[in-house]
Image (cartoon, grey):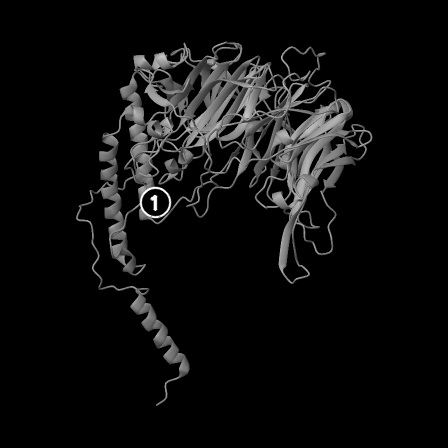
Amino acid sequence: MLVPREKLLAVFIVSLFALSGCLANNDAEVEIPQIELPEDWSTVTKRSVSKPNLLAFTDCDELEQQLKESILEEYRIQLLQAVEEQYYYGGWFGDDVMMEDGAVAEASSDSAIGGSNSVQPRREQGTDFSGTNNQEQGVDEADFVKTDGYYIYFLNGKTLVILGVPEFGELEALSNTSIEGTPQAMMLDGDRLVVISSVSSWNIPSTNPLYEAMGWNDEYSSWRTSSLTKFSVLDVTDRSNPELERELFLEGSYITAREVNGTIRTVSHAWLNLPQMKSWLDYPEGYWNLDYDDPQRRIIREKVAYQTMLDNQDALDKISIEDIIPQVYERINGAVLIHGLSDGDCNDFVAPEDGLNRGFNSIFTFDLSSSKFDFDADHIVGNYPMVYASQDQLILSENAWDWWWFWGDDESQESTNLHTFDISNPKETVYTGSGRVDGTILNQFSLSEYQGIIRVATTEGQWGRWWMENPEPMSSSVITLTHRVDSNTGEMSLEQLGIVDGIAPEERIWSARFDGDRAYLVTFRQIDPLWVIDLSNPAQPIILGELEIPGVSTYIHPLSKDALLTIGMGPAGEDGFGLDWSSTRLSIFDISDPTAPNVSSILSVSPVQTDESNSWVWSYSEASYEHKAFQYWAPKDMLAIPLSTYRYLSWYDASGNYQWSYDYVSKLMLVNIPLDGTNMSIHGEVNHSSFYNDDENNYWWNDYNIRRSIFMGDYVYAISSGGVTATNLTSLEQSASVQLDYQSPYSNYYYYDDVVVSESEDDSSAETSSSDGGAEPEKT
């Protein structure tokens, strides 16, 4: 009898799978851990909820005990999730490389504008030139571009570029200084510049003393933490030759920084790695040969998980307090000093009363007026923070509990802790109380302080719990809080004063803005409602008006009490629903009657005209998600936003060889913003595309976008990695241009002179340091 060809083929394929081990072999020997499981080994105890107030630790032993309890529980929950085959696929971003000594630019030191003895007429920010688009007046936010009206400071890749502006419309290259790591932002006050950069542990060479100081042992990837935040303090009195004054390295990642009256406050978050601790299951040989639904697989997972929990306990018992709290390293005169932050009694560490976390939020306060650049440090045991600051108060918000806290406790709701600090004294950061609100916040614009009242916009719901099939739907609230003193304990706390809740069921907040006694929210799911909320009576906030409009606004910029300017995206289709992610749309909302807000003008902007082949990729503007790229200049009623796109070009040359390149479009769009109710219009554009469309710079991973803009007099300065230009706002003719050499901070490159490492407690360290280098930093 003939066997059908299909059956022969099937038999052949099955034989191949069997020979290659791709099919399960139920008879294979599997090594099952020989351990008995206690009845309560997997029980998740319902977590207690009390107060978010920050409590100081009585001593380092108490801090160590609480941290270790939190660490064990976090690892235990992750192991239980592994047993259930539920995994959290989070991501991480490496920081980067470290520093080479500054290469000085080609500008002459006797330049009239670059020298230290030049006398300049005073130029006023807000009148003569624009600065950083800050959330609050009088509170400067760190950014990678700064100006004082006479100079432009630009962190371009790994280089600090300083350009002079002798007269508006002019440019003069003064200096290039290489910066260690991945430059993130900087703060400027007079002749002092603080550059903040991230340094990746992975790129520290073995010859660097930080390599030894930050490593657990000689094993690969055994770092205390994957990232350092570095503060480089520069004296820029002579802009053609900046001088490095001080270098500090803090374990953890940079979050943000604010400057008020010469005092800088930076916030970083540290999450330390722990040796020998495991949050995953090491399966025994033969496990993967079992059928997926074989009950032995579950038995093995449970026993491996429990054994790993016991191993984690043993590993943690061998770790000291110094191993689980962040450190500060200082480089002075060729020596690296290690500043332990425990101070012997750990009184600079605080934690929420019901907190169960292992991360650290550190607030560093720097006094730029001090010749020694002294700093104070406060450390909060908590989750990844968001930061808001007015001139008098700093608010640090954090999720009350980490995501793993809710495993096995789906009834609990997400909440946000708010910790407030008095910053009215330039040299101090004083804790003034904490409060808790339901839900989570979007960003810094969801927070505000006005006349002593704290305002916050939150979205409630369980949408962050990926393991739940039917999480509770979302809704939003605006809450007001005030400081009150407990008459029994004398403890200061934040207590809810008023609330308007139930806003936009099944939608979440996409943008928020507090302005005086009003709040503005944009929520979205399929269509964009704008909400106007009256906060004039903070005890009884009320919704004044609502407007539904297609698309969504991602940033709200108040123009006046009667008008809002927003940026976002248009709708996906003619029905007005969904989002067109390839579009950038500006809108002006008329709120002169807050009970009936309406749209007075809409303008869609694009860097190119769509061609028939539709070969351009989606255009985008950084201003749609980064407010510092959004530059509205009231003296000219004009907005500047970057827009960019690119396309891939390919062809065959005369010899038949395949050729390709990228065609970049990088523009700064100038938009007229009328305040009389008429329509917005394109005023003109600044084009930086020529900086990028050449053979040497034609790679898709290059940064080809205009990132920031500055208005100065009758000119606008456009800043991108390829160059800086000045353009006359009347004629739209370019008046000055400086082309820049871009060096990516993401290249694995590190230059470092030979230095020695010493402990700050060692008396000998002071002999190799400056007069203040060997001492422990003063702490509040």
Q: Name the image quarter holding the N terminus.
A: bottom left
56 or 672, which is in the foreground?
672
Residue 675's place in the image compared with 780, above or below, is below
Is residue 638 visible in the rendered image? The answer is yes
**For residue 329, side relative to residue 583 (left or right):** left
> Percent from the top left, x then y, of residue 465?
44, 42
**For residue 380, side relative to residue 699 (left or right):** left
Callout 1 crowding tier (Cα within 10 Å): few <14, some 14–19, many ≥20: many
* Residue position marked by numbered label 1 in the rendering: 81
> Percent from the top left, x then y, of residue 16?
33, 71
> Percent from the top left, x then y, of residue 97?
46, 33
Mark 1: amino acid: Gln
390 or 728, which is in the foreground?
728
Secondary structure category for the residue under label 1: helix
Query: Where, by quadrant of the figure, is residue 600 drawn?
Result: top right
For image coordinates 48% across by 16% down, the residue present is 365
